[in-house]
Image (cartoon, rainbow, N blue to C red):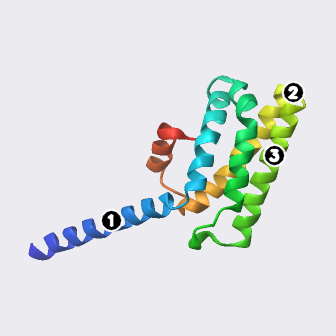
Amino acid sequence: MKNLIAIVVLWSFCAACSHKEHHEKKAEWKELDSFHKIMADVFHPLKDSGDLKPVKKLAAQLAEEAERLASSSLPENLRSDEMKSNLEKLKTDSKSLADEIAKGASDDAIKEKLTALHDQFHKIMEASQGSHGHDENEEHEHDDEDED
């Protein structure tokens, strides 16, 4: 019985440490968090009710945040050519969206580009969380919190 208790205590300790490390890694890239916030501010209204006013108003800010993110210092575990390429695409596509909105792009074009930009962002977000197949509860927790 003592062995069983020891195993449970050890397992609990390891799970707690692993969970803490996961959140520490997530929190160390403040530029990603900043971009995530603005992406949520512009994407949720589209997703939830088809509202494009926020993206039309905040597109330039979204592009600025993408620029900051792409030029930020990447966490060591994410330094790869693939991540740099994904960030560069996010930056370029964010700028393109802002430019097109400024020129009076159609609502359909904005919806299409914002959705693609959101998908691109998720590639980066998932890689940063090490969650190429994170569990369903975490996804729902993320959705309820502030999905982008």
Q: Is residue 30 left or right of residue 111?
A: left
Q: Write the residue at 44% across / 47% down.
A: 137
Q: Is residue 97 left or right of residue 127?
A: right
Residue 49 in the image: above or below residue 75: above
94 or 106: nearer the viewer: 94
- Who comes first in sequence, dot 1 or dot 2? 1
Tag 1: amino acid: Ala
Q: Residue furthest right?
A: 103
In what element is the residue under mark 2? loop
Using a 10 Å C-alpha cutoff, classify the residue at mark 3 as few (fewer than 14 neighbours), some (14 to 19) or many (20 or more).
many
Q: Residue furthest bottom?
A: 3
Tag 3: amino acid: Lys
Q: CA distance from mark 2 to mark 3?
A: 16 Å
Q: Write the residue at 14% across / 76% down.
A: 3
22 or 35: nearer the viewer: 35
Which labelled disc corresponds to residue 106? 2
- Pinpoint residue 15: horizontal percent, then vertical percent: 32, 65
Residue placed under numbered mark 3 in the picture? 95
Residue placed under numbered mark 1 in the picture? 15
- Residue 115 lies in quadrant: top right
In what element is the residue under mark 1? helix
Residue 110 in the image: above or below residue 75: above
Q: Please identify the quadrant where the N terminus is shown.
A: bottom left
- Regarding residue 11, the answer to whether it shows in the image is yes
